[in-house]
């Protein structure tokens, strides 16, 4: 006498869920779709009264070519990669040993240093723009790669995240390394670094995304077009004559946004894990 | 009378050495500048000028008497007041919906998170074209329903809400990811206990288990979202530059304009100090209030 | 107060079968323990009884009423979880009051802001207060009522969880390994308290554990489950003295029962009436039914590996070599401390009380005593 426990019925709650989420997905993706659509259209189509997603006459090549030739877009992207990579590398070199020292070593002034780090977490970076500007001006470093990179070499968030992570690592691992004869700096780079990869990845993602997308500081520190980072670059394009035309402008925007988006789509889980890790700390 | 073990002394040196570069940079790029800003704000210095006078609190007097400053302050506060509940609320609803069933979770998470990653300067330009009064997507859509949409970015009544909407658009995916992580951490046994106690409807489960246990995450999301909202700049600078007639002027844009367009360094520094104070106080206050309400033991 | 009837319960998780057509009748008011190793399906069965999951096929009745398809709150059961599952943001009082509030207050009366203003609410709350306080008194946790679970010790939390279950006076109490998270001393104390509670309330208790000692000391009857099937159901004494399956014999009792496969038995044993039946593959007997004797004079011969002196008893651990190679068979003999001193390395024989020899066939099933079989 067996009773089938489930009878077939349309899954109304499940469908409602998909329906509602479809709306929010549409909201999230609408600008991207719009941007792509316009980047493929000739000017007449953009202004015509009825709207179609796919262009009637494909104008994509012209738009993208205009975008790439009017301003050095490829240069902007390169700058983005170079600046972000350099910033992150320097941050790692400087913050990792400090975080290790804060987490595992005892020295006088450690707590004061950590308090300074915590205070740094509260300070929004834009508040330091004026003094950074003045400092770079004093050294004649404005309008250079150095100007884009130097103010960010210290990252209190990086120190904080790494320190929290290191605290979770058992002391025995370090004691074993010491017994094996390793000096402290060897320990930092040979033992702690490999172990810290997940935390580093999380912080790296955060750092790269933040600096790739930063408009405020490059706007202040840079005057020359060739040094522009992606965010500044698209603004320059928009203000240029050719940027008055929506087609090429949208093409330019697509090119600027594409690298991070593609990186995200390829490494989704990493991004999301990184955020969860940051939140837990 | 304790004797130092042989390993303690080397620690001192190594510790200092390891932390040295960071400490130097911290002093040079963080502590120093904070102090410098305070000092600058008490002078009438303009960058590039050779001399500056110490003028005490004159900059602050001028600041607090400036109508534009107060407009920017109120606008920023309004912006935050719209964006924070919008972002957190939408993020929470989407997270709950995504976690309610297993199907397509990965896709939904990725799709909603895309705006968070994208370069705001570029997407602001895209939104600018979407908000175009005649050919923009928003007004075309409204026209389908017979509504004549306004000129969003040029109409003083609508410009701030429009910018706020863009802010919500960018942020809710981030809130969603954090909420999803929080939801995953809730043990199934609590829902089981609730079902046995009689709470098996959606509203009951939310009130008894889900929302209370999301407390700490919600607090974190609120603080983070509020901080980011206060730092609004890109959309304003790209789309409206504070207009029309300062209807969309915000604190950071004001800071930029005064310090780097007009080069009034002293005055800009005073604005910076005020901005800094507001953000720090807001963060600390939020953390204090929410922390007490949210922790269980 | 109600009995339970489970009929041909089948449950699979994806490709893995968890319960394979299990049937069980639980008497009204009895304390029944479901015991078995991890993964045997006992917790799943409990969840099915509670209504938290539905079986793929089969039927469940509580108190004579078929409850298939009914939600947990309609089944009149209460459950205590291994992790206690107390609402961390509510005080102990609110935790215990929750099931009463949800059942007695209407949706409007429970609403956050204006609920307390609704008519009738005050009276119901007063009623609830009386009952919660009564339960708290019974469990000796009255002073803990204002505290939150995070401020309570493990044992205190357990009592609050019990209180939450008791306050509704359900027909059936379900307990999913509630003692596993407690330290040894507290566990023993709580065992006694739960059995006392059972005697006092006289409700049906269905208790799940993997600890055979708990099952033995607390239950009226024990159901031994393995790999999704019910192997044997009986009183603790029945299971101990009369296991119907080798797995039951080995699971119940500490130290483990001695099992000697046929090829280890000495010629004396195989020749004698002890192993007469052809189907016998192994003989089993408890350590307290065993004794040491001269080598070659008993059922088997082995070497002593260790001696455990517990003060009240002496356990002599030995090993008998297997003629076919392979790991030696362990066995344990219980002796009074006053017996002859033995040392590790000594060769000894093992003998057993004839009346307490259990015979098992090659499939692990018990073979009845010769006298009981038809002539």
Image (tube, rainbow, N blue to C red):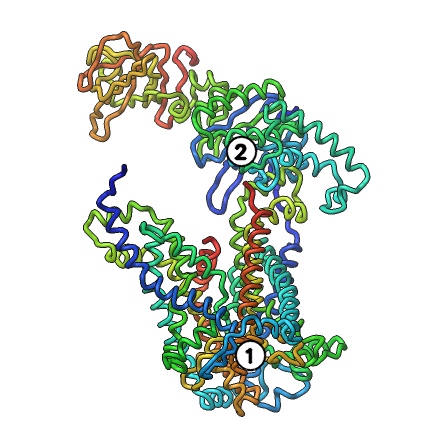
The front one of B100 and A161 is: A161
Looking at the rendered structure, the secondary structure element under dot 1 is helix
Query: Which chain contains the residue that carries disc 1?
Result: B
Q: Residue at x 62, y 76 (%)?
A: B249
Residue for badge 1? B258
Q: Quadrant of the N terminus of chain B?
A: top left
| Vertical position of residue B1 compared to residue B91: above or below | above
Q: Is residue A105 above or below residue B254?
A: above
**Residue designated by label 2:** C152
Label 2: few (<14), some (14–19) or many (≥20) C-alpha neighbours in 10 Å: some
Q: Is residue B73 visible?
A: yes
In the displayed structure, does residue A14 sit left or right of residue C292?
A: right
Q: Residue shown at 47%/82% (left/top)?
A: A233
**Residue occupying the point 46% across, 81% down:** B51
| Residue B149: x %, y % from top left | 72, 78
Q: Which corner quadrant holds the C terminus of chain B?
A: top right
């Amino acid at each position: 006498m067996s009773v089938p426990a489930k009878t077939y019925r349309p899954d109304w709650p499940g469908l409602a869920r998909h329906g509602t989420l479809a709306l929010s997905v549409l909201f999230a993706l609408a600008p991207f779709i719009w941007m792509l659509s316009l980047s493929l259209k000739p000017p007449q189509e953009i202004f015509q009264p009825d709207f179609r997603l796919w262009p009637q006459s494909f104008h994509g090549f012209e738009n993208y070519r205009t975008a790439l030739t009017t301003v050095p877009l490829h240069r902007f992207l390169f700058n983005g990669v170079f600046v972000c990579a350099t910033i992150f590398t320097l941050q790692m070199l400087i913050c990792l040993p400090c975080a290790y020292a804060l987490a595992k070593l005892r020295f006088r002034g450690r707590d004061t240093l950590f308090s300074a780090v915590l205070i740094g977490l509260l300070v929004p970076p834009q508040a330091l723009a004026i003094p950074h500007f003045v400092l770079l001006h004093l050294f004649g470093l404005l309008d250079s790669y150095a100007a884009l990179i130097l103010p960010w070499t210290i990252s209190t968030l990086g120190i904080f995240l790494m320190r929290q992570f290191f605290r979770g690592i058992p002391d025995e691992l370090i004691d074993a390394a010491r017994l094996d004869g390793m000096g402290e700096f060897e320990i930092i780079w040979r033992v702690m670094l490999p172990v810290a990869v997940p935390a580093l990845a999380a912080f790296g993602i955060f750092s790269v995304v933040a600096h790739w997308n930063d408009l405020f500081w490059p706007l202040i520190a840079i005057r020359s077009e060739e040094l522009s980072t992606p965010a500044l670059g698209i603004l320059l394009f928009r203000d240029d004559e050719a940027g008055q035309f929506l087609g090429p402008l949208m093409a330019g925007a697509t090119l600027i946004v594409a690298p991070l988006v593609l990186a995200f789509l390829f490494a989704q889980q990493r991004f999301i894990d990184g955020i969860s890790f940051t939140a837990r700390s | 009378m304790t004797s130092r073990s042989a390993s303690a002394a080397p620690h001192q040196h190594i510790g200092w050495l390891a932390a040295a570069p960071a400490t130097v940079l911290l002093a040079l790029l963080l502590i120093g500048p904070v102090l410098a800003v305070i000092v600058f704000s008490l002078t009438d210095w303009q960058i590039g000028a050779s001399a500056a006078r110490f003028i005490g609190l004159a900059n602050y007097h001028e600041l607090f008497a400036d109508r534009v400053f107060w407009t920017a302050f109120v606008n920023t506060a309004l912006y935050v007041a719209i964006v924070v509940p919008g972002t957190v609320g939408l993020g929470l609803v989407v997270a709950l919906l995504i976690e309610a069933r297993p199907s397509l979770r990965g896709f939904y998470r990725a799709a909603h998170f895309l705006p968070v990653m994208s370069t705001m300067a570029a997407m602001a330009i895209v939104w600018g074209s979407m908000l175009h009064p005649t050919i923009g997507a928003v007004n075309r859509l409204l026209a389908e329903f017979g509504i004549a949409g306004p000129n969003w970015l040029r109409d003083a009544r609508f410009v701030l809400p429009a910018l706020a909407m863009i802010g919500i658009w960018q942020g809710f995916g981030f809130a969603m990811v954090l909420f999803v992580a929080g939801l995953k951490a809730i043990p199934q046994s609590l829902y089981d206990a609730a079902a046995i106690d009689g709470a098996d409807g959606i509203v009951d489960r939310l009130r008894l288990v889900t929302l209370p246990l999301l407390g700490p995450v919600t607090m974190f999301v609120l603080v983070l979202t509020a901080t980011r909202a206060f730092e609004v700049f890109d959309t304003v600078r790209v789309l409206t530059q504070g207009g029309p007639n300062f209807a969309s002027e915000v604190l950071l844009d004001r800071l930029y304009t005064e310090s780097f367009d007009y080069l009034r360094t002293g005055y800009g520094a005073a604005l910076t100090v005020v901005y800094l104070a507001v953000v720090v106080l807001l963060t600390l206050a939020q953390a204090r209030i929410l922390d007490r309400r949210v922790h269980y033991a | 107060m109600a009995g339970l009837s489970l009929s041909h319960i089948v449950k699979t998780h994806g490709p893995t079968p968890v319960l394979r057509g299990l049937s069980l009748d639980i008497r009204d008011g009895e304390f029944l323990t479901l015991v078995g190793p991890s993964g045997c399906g006992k917790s799943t069965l409990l969840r099915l009884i509670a209504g938290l999951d539905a079986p793929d096929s089969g039927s469940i009745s509580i108190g004579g009423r078929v409850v298939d398809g009914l939600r947990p709150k309609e089944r009149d059961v209460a459950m205590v979880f291994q992790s206690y599952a107390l609402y961390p943001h509510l005080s102990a009082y609110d935790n215990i009051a929750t099931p009463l509030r949800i059942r007695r207050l209407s949706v409007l009366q429970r609403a956050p802001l204006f609920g307390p203003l609704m008519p009738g609410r005050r009276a119901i709350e007063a009623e609830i207060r009386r009952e919660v306080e009564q339960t708290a008194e019974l469990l000796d946790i009255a002073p803990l009522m204002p505290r939150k679970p995070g401020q309570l010790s493990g044992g205190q939390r357990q009592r609050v969880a019990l209180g939450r279950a008791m306050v509704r006076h359900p027909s059936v109490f379900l307990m999913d390994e509630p003692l596993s998270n407690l330290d040894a001393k507290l566990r023993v104390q709580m065992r006694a308290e739960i059995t006392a509670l059972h005697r006092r309330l006289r409700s049906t208790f269905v208790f799940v554990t993997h600890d055979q000692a708990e099952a033995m000391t607390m239950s009226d009857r024990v159901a031994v489950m393995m790999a999704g099937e019910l192997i044997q159901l009986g009183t603790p004494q029945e299971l101990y003295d009369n296991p119907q399956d080798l797995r039951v014999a080995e699971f119940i009792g500490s130290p483990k029962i001695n099992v000697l496969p046929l090829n280890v038995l000495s010629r004396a044993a195989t020749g004698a009436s002890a192993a007469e039946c052809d189907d016998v593959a192994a003989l089993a007997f408890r350590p307290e039914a065993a004794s040491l004797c001269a080598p070659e004079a008993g059922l088997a011969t082995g070497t002593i590996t260790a001696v455990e002196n517990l003060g009240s008893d002496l356990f002599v651990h030995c090993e008998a070599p297997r003629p076919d190679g392979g790991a030696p068979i362990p066995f344990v003999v219980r002796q009074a401390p006053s017996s002859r001193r033995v040392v590790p390395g000594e060769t000894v024989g093992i003998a057993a009380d004839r009346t307490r020899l259990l015979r098992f066939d090659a499939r692990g099933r018990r073979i009845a005593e010769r006298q009981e079989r038809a002539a």
